[in-house]
Amino acid sequence: MPADPHIVAVLALEGVVGFDLSMPCQVFGTARLADGSYPYQVRFCGVAPSVNVTAGGVGFYRIEAPNGRDAAEDAGTIVVPGVTTTRLTAPSVLALLREAAKRRVRIVSICTGAFVLAEAGLLSGRQVTTHWAAAGELARRHPDSTSTPSLSTSETVTCSPRPASPPGSTCGCTWFTATSAPRSPQGLADRSGHGSASALRAHFDRESRTSPHRYRQSFRPRD
């Protein structure tokens, strides 16, 4: 692991979706740089002694996190997995996210985790998305943001399956940052394990059928 790894805090909130909780641990915890080192230190952070883990709004089991909420306070990235949308978020979690946003920490949500960011007031005035089945409810609860079932921008963070996806299918993730400083192509290549900017561009072009520059230009902030 590098001497100064990027700390990723994954929040285990009450009613967390089990798949969404494990996904960032898998993605960031197994990433490696060209030299074989791990660029990320992943912290699994709970906000209660144990939390109920759900799927489809149904609780299946309880888990305990090895770290408390305070372990997320110095993170460079905070990930909010999807949660059951029928419950309100603990005030301490909302305060944590607001303070992190002030420090320009990268804040990421997955699927219905967008409800937590909206509740914290971080999505006001932004175009946002969530799980397609919950997009209407997000728009109803938080009319100060523009909700759409299918969106990929550099303005907000979430993961949304396409409306055409069959029920129960595994959705693809669209990661995007609400508050992140620009990185150089080489810096991004180093962080993502591609080794060089040219290798990163080739991989990006192969996966997205466009260049990183054209992709960024497509999502410039609107006047």
Image: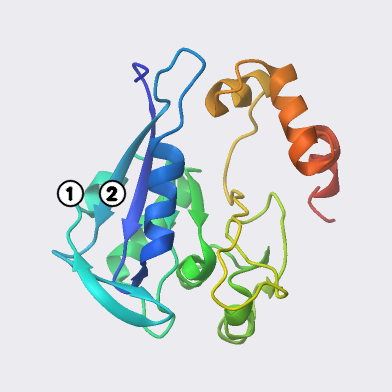
- The residue singled out by tag 1 in the image is 66
Drawn side of residue 38 relative to residue 135, left or right: left
Q: Would residue 18 appear left or right of 197 to someone viewing this image?
A: left
How many residues crowd mark 2 within 10 Å: few (<14), some (14–19), many (20+)? many
Q: Is residue 190 left or right of residue 10?
A: right
At x 57%, y 69%, the residue is: 169
Q: Residue at x 62, y 56 (%)?
A: 156
Residue drawn at (37%, 54%) of the image: 22
- In this rendering, is residue 128 above or below 134? above
The spot of residue 139 in percent (x, y) is 63, 81
Residue at which label 2 appears: 44
> Percent position (x, y) of residue 132?
64, 75
Q: Nearer the viewer, residue 156 or 201?
A: 201
Q: Quadrant of the N terminus?
A: top left
**Mark 1 and 2 residues: CB-CB less than 8 Å, in contact?**
yes
Mark 1 to mark 2 CA distance (whole Å): 6 Å
Res 46 quadrant in image: bottom left
* Amino acid type assigned to the residue bearing label 1 in the image: Pro
